[in-house]
Image: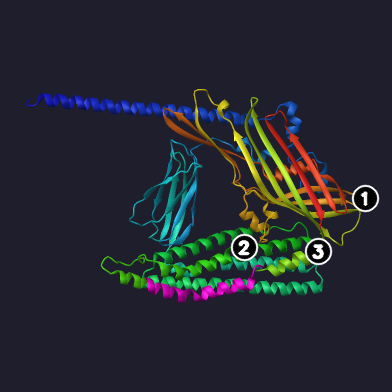
């Protein structure tokens, strides 16, 4: 053997390398087992407490606790509701431990817009757990099917509040894209999809809004026809005139959208003819697309939400419905009309200032004057092409002023007809609610919310008798949330929590129904306001005893499923961070306030209105406790 020393060294290296790999595999396996055991311990400990919280209470609390869990079969009968010791629905059913389970990882993500022009910007944003162990999230974006481009991998930096944003610029190819956003520990992911369209589709950029305006117009006319059945001939004639004006405004809005469609289609044709599209034009068309997409979402929700039946068949209820249908239209002009006009005007202005290279134009062997010549061409052509759309947008803004599409009809119905045919009361509600969960004498989790609302009551003037029956609404939103949870006492002492975070729902600190300068109406405010509610109530005023009894009826809108508290924890097992989160549900306003009102429903009434207040306390000293209090001040208009 010519090289025995080399052979021995090779054998030793091979054996050592094999042993190292084996030891690494054993180490990884041990780490994985330790991590899995810690994972199970956390889940088991929390689930055990969850199960305990959902068991029936001890006999000493049973009477109080079942009061808040029972379901009445007569919830829509005010007289039965008045005396029953039950609640319209169970508070338990709308958010309790029974809906909770520890989840691995935590990631929330959205994409906007979910469809836009080639070359325009797409933004992926969301929320996750921030710590010194994890500082970014991974995002993979798969190109459209049939593309030769590989899936791209990106990172987005996590801010200290857990939020992240990632602007995606790789939108040069049309088609359907898929983005996958991973939690920092890769245990959870969120799939998103978005579509990139080419210049061929630019002539339909505002078409969906036109269709939605037609649908909203039909809904408005149905309500107007039902209201007119109970109005005097003179009032019917005036309503017809106001409705005619509204129709003209709607047609003017559609004309503007048609002009924008035609202008954008012509810009797209120039690009298809090989003229090249400057980056500024693509950017401005992308902004216009975003405006239309937001408006489409808003109008779609408005139309669906306005389809509920009136609380009664009196003219007062149809006037209330008409008010909301008119106000919903105002978002088109007040909120988006000016923005649309500015976006169209910006196209020729920005291209005149653009020093960038037009899309699709090869300039490696061309001089600067050639590039500037392209921009000069686009500046002039885009100004000509968008002139009609700009004029129509300006004309619409001038025609409508601050009144909106159906402003005159809205004012006539609310200021004149409602006062002529109905007696109305209005006021405000302030409400505070607490929900406390305990485990072995320790507070496990607790949340509170404060709400403000506008209270409205009404009845036809032709109603008489000893008992006057009224219809009404309570419209408002949560103005504050607090939330805290403690799982340390639930976990084995061998497990240490490295980081913890409480996430409460987004709120606005004012009551939207009392601070709506533009008069958008309940349908629009529901979209713009987090933790919004729109409750219907009934009332019976006994003119002999001078007492009024108020009954909760139902929620037309209430806290959305997104309104929940979230608890995030991070533990370290075998040196590996583990993220866990729990969705802590929140009882909706209709359920908690409905239960409180039922226990405090009668108030002294005078000629000017009433001042009511009440408190509720259920389950004191038990595993689940509810506390609430309110004040309601209502005056005759």
Up/down of 233 relative to 531, above or below: below
For label 1, the SS is loop
Alpha carbon distance from label 2 to label 1: 45 Å
Alpha carbon distance from label 1 to label 3: 25 Å
- Other residues around mark 2 within 10 Å, as few (<14) / some (14–19) / many (≥20): many
Observer-side mark, 1 or 3, equals 3
Q: Which residues are magenta?
A: 375-403
Circle number at residue 417: none
User: Which numbered disc, 2 or 3, marks the residue that appears first in the sequence?
Assistant: 2
Alpha carbon distance from label 2 to label 3: 26 Å
**x%, y% of residue 372?**
35, 70
Label count reads 3
- Say which residue label 1 marks: 544
Q: Judge by depth and name the residue closer to the eye, 39 or 411.
A: 411
Magenta-span inclusion, residue 538: no
- Say which residue label 2 marks: 331
- Say which residue label 3 marks: 419
Q: Is residue 193 visible?
A: yes
**x%, y% of residue 564?**
60, 42
For label 3, the SS is helix
Residue contact at pointers 2 and 3, CB within 8 angstroms = no
Examine the residues drawn in magenta and state their main secondary structure: helix
């Amino acid at each position: 053997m010519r090289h025995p020393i080399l052979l021995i060294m090779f054998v030793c290296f091979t054996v050592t390398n094999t042993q190292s790999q084996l030891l690494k595999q054993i180490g990884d396996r041990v780490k994985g087992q330790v991590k899995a055991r810690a994972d199970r311990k956390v889940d088991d400990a929390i689930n055990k407490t969850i199960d305990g919280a959902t068991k029936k209470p001890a006999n000493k609390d049973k009477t109080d606790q079942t009061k808040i869990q029972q379901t009445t079969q007569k919830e829509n009968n005010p007289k039965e509701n008045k005396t029953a010791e039950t609640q319209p629905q169970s508070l338990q059913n709308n958010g309790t431990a029974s809906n909770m389970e520890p989840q691995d990882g935590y990631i929330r993500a959205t994409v906007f817009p979910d469809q836009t022009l080639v070359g325009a910007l797409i933004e992926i944003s969301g929320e996750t757990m921030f710590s010194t162990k994890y500082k970014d999230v991974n995002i993979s974006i798969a190109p459209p099917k049939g593309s030769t481009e590989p899936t791209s991998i990106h990172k987005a930096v996590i801010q200290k509040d857990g939020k992240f944003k990632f602007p995606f610029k790789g939108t040069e190819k049309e088609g359907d894209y898929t983005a996958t956003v991973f939690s920092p520990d890769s245990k959870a992911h969120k799939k998103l999809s978005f579509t990139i369209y080419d210049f061929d589709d630019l002539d339909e950029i505002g078409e969906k809004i036109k269709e939605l305006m037609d649908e909203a117009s039909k809904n408005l006319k149905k309500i107007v026809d039902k209201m007119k059945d109970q109005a005097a001939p003179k009032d019917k004639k005036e309503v017809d005139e106001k409705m005619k004006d509204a129709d003209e405004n709607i047609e003017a809005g559609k004309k503007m959208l048609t002009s924008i469609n035609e202008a954008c289609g012509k810009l797209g044709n120039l690009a298809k003819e090989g003229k090249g599209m400057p980056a500024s034009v693509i950017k401005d068309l992308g902004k216009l697309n975003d405006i239309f997409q937001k408006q489409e979402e808003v109008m779609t929700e408005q139309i669906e939400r306005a389809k509920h039946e009136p609380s009664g068949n009196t003219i007062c209820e149809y006037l209330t419905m008409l008010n909301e249908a008119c106000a919903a239209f105002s978002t088109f002009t007040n909120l988006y009309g000016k923005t649309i006009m500015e976006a169209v005007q910006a196209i020729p202005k920005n291209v005149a200032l653009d020093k960038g290279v037009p899309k699709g134009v090869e300039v490696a062997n061309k001089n600067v004057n050639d590039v500037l010549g392209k921009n000069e061409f686009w500046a002039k052509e885009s100004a000509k092409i968008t002139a009609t759309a700009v004029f129509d947008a300006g004309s619409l803004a001038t025609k409508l002023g601050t009144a909106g599409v159906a402003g005159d009809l809205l004012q006539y119905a609310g200021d004149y007809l409602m006062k002529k045919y109905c007696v109305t009361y209005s006021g405000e509600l302030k409400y505070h609610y607490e929900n406390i969960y305990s485990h072995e004498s320790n507070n496990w989790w607790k949340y509170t919310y404060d709400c403000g609302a506008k209270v409205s009551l009404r009845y036809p003037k032709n109603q008489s008798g000893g008992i006057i029956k009224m219809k009404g609404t309570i419209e408002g939103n949560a103005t504050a949330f607090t939330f805290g949870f403690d799982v340390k006492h639930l976990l084995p002492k061998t497990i240490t929590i490295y980081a913890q975070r409480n996430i409460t729902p987004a709120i606005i600190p004012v009551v939207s129904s009392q601070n709506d300068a533009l008069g958008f109406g309940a349908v629009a405010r529901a979209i713009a306001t987090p933790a919004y509610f729109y409750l219907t109530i009934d009332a019976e005023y006994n003119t002999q005893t001078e007492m009024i009894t108020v009954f909760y009826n139902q929620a037309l809108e209430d806290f959305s499923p997104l309104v929940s508290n979230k608890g995030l924890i991070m533990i370290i097992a075998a040196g590996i961070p583990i993220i866990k989160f729990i969705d802590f549900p929140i009882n909706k306003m209709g359920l908690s306030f409905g239960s409180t009102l039922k226990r405090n429903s009668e108030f002294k009434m005078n000629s000017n209105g009433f001042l009511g207040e009440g408190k509720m306390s259920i389950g004191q000293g038990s595993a689940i406790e509810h506390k609430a209090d309110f004040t309601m001040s209502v005056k005759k208009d």
